[in-house]
Amino acid sequence: MATGGAVTARQLARQLGVSQSMVSRAFDPATSVAPAMRARILEAAAALGYRPNGIAAALTRRRSRIVGLVMGELQNPFYPAVLEQMTLALQAAGFEALLLTVPPGQQADACLPRLRQYQVDAVVLTSASLSSAGATHWLGDGRAAVLFNRTASGATPLDSVACDNAAGARLAAEALLDAGRRELVFVAGRPDTSTSQERERGFLSAFAARGLRAPRRIAAGDFSYEAGHRAALQAGNADGIFFANDILALGGMDALRHAAGRRVPQDVAVMGFDDIPMAGWPGYSLTTLRQPVAAMIEATIEILQARLEGDRQPARALRLPAALVPRGSFLPAA
Amino acid sequence: MATGGAVTARQLARQLGVSQSMVSRAFDPATSVAPAMRARILEAAAALGYRPNGIAAALTRRRSRIVGLVMGELQNPFYPAVLEQMTLALQAAGFEALLLTVPPGQQADACLPRLRQYQVDAVVLTSASLSSAGATHWLGDGRAAVLFNRTASGATPLDSVACDNAAGARLAAEALLDAGRRELVFVAGRPDTSTSQERERGFLSAFAARGLRAPRRIAAGDFSYEAGHRAALQAGNADGIFFANDILALGGMDALRHAAGRRVPQDVAVMGFDDIPMAGWPGYSLTTLRQPVAAMIEATIEILQARLEGDRQPARALRLPAALVPRGSFLPAA
DNA sequence: ACCGTGATTGCATACGGATGCAAAAGCCCT
DNA sequence: AGGGCTTTTGCATCCGTATGCAATCACGGT
């Protein structure tokens, strides 16, 4: 805290000959203060550099306006942009973001005590999840929690915001099938993630709808470049591969071209999911499905605020549509 | 804060028949409490899920144990790993990380009031900087600040931790020259960053030392893939290009290969700086200089702690050596 | 058994603001 | 001018913990 020369509300008040409460109220737009008085206080505050002590305010208000941001998978290039936009959006909504990192694939439960200790109002779990017990306990305290880019498993009572992975993956399958590709392969990522599962389900559903037999499935095991690379080497003579995300697809493309000697897209069409920045690089030019990140973040924050204001509706799983981004790694029939 | 069912020190104390102060002291390893008493309290605390309220503690202790992490350039793939390791290291040192984002190239001064309001103990500025006035004011409050991967400009009294950009860049120049490359080009990034400036200086110094005329310089203007791509297209028939960082180099390589029809490394050797994950991908296999990220983070935190404990020495600019990572985009003579 | 000394413990208060409640001040209308 | 109301304002108190100070305790030495 190091309250070096920090001016306090009392000092400001004394100097103005008013009570400390008035200073406090002047900063709360919801309370009624005579306009002249408020102006006088705010002006003096600006002059002296006074700003209410957020820590002290949190103590009495019993709300810290701090949101915990729990990130798994930071090394996936999809997330830096999310992180950046998310912190900006939180700031715009009047929150601060406390950043926690969780080893990929691990439950975020271990972070809860620390978040609780710092009286965080809410958590956004990005590619991380919470045990059902952890979630219930957390929510029971009147705190909020939203899963971002994950959906709650089973009966875990958590709100979630994600893109419609299944529908997006189905678009991918349909585009590949419409282009006449028949030897298709799905490369799965981390098996315990809702993203990988939903994308697989959506991809398969297109085959079922057309009465085609299910495509081959290769388990990459992980959402990494290396895993995609390894997986692609097992794809044999497939003429189309849909990877559960872009980073897998990039590894896969490199393997296909440099190790397997196959041409993309002539010999094999490649599609990914997320639309990370590198997907657009000319060296890859990866056809993919774009997640509506900005809209997802906006929705996340709206849910958060509603919950903090006491919304007690049952948890919702919000899904926003993914958009097909055609690029050189596979040009869908127009 | 939402202190739902949160147990307070008083409740715990009452239940144990001791005073609230004892509970407080039991959690502070520095105070002397009868071992049996401490054990009893900690045990009961664990049973009831009590943890001291960090917000309240911050208020009395006048230290929040929160560190502001100001990030510019999050879209540069060098930073996610930094961010991840930094938060983990901060956590290990008993701090929480408050994440703020700053538009690239902008001073971080605008964040200070918000950080001050939340009584942050210290700031780590990663690829962002502070005006001299802002720094002085901040430090004057008894708070700490460390620049990471930047060095303070002019008389700004800030500690900084960075890798030895000049020495690293000189290594690059020497390797290229030793391999007989003569038509060299330096591609600069954001002109107002210490990283770009120091790398340029180091690169040039090798030429001066050998009595060679300075290499050509192309200003990319920015540390982005696109900027690197554009810059490379102006490189003409250079036989070696050193880009101010990896992301520029990747854009450059793609431009050289796909747009300029030049082979890397046969026609033109390419080197970057940072060693981001993609530099190791087979499609690029970029020879680069690796920043000692782990050591840099460790040093950052040590400085932070020393300053918070009252260290008043003049600001230091710590530099850790970068290591040459030879890859396919240019194989230095052994 | 008594005193001195250092280790434990409890008491009271402070940290900086928010807020319920009651007093004070305006305001409108008759 | 006076009564009934609505705003404004000040007072007092509380949020949950840390900590200086004084009281209490345990224990060794004589």
Image (spheres, coloured by chain):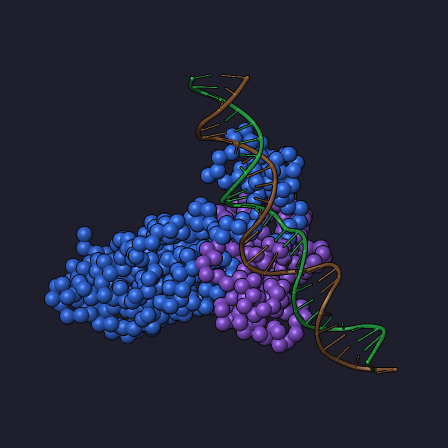
Chain colours: A purple, B blue, C brown, D green
Q: Quadrant of residue B24?
A: top right
Residue plotted at (18% across, 52% down): B334
Residue A128: x and y in percent read 55, 51
Left of A3 or right of it: where is A302? right
Q: Quadrant of residue A297?
A: bottom right
Left of B279 or right of it: where is A235? right
Q: Nearer the viewer, residue A176 or B40?
A: B40
Residue A151: x and y in percent read 61, 54
Left of A227 or right of it: where is A25? right
Residue A83: x and y in percent read 50, 60
Q: Is residue A160 visible?
A: no
Residue plotted at (34% across, 72% down): B221
Residue plotted at (72% across, 56% down): A312
Q: Is residue B288 above or below residue B47?
A: below
Q: How many marks?
A: 0
Left of A129 or right of it: where is C29? right
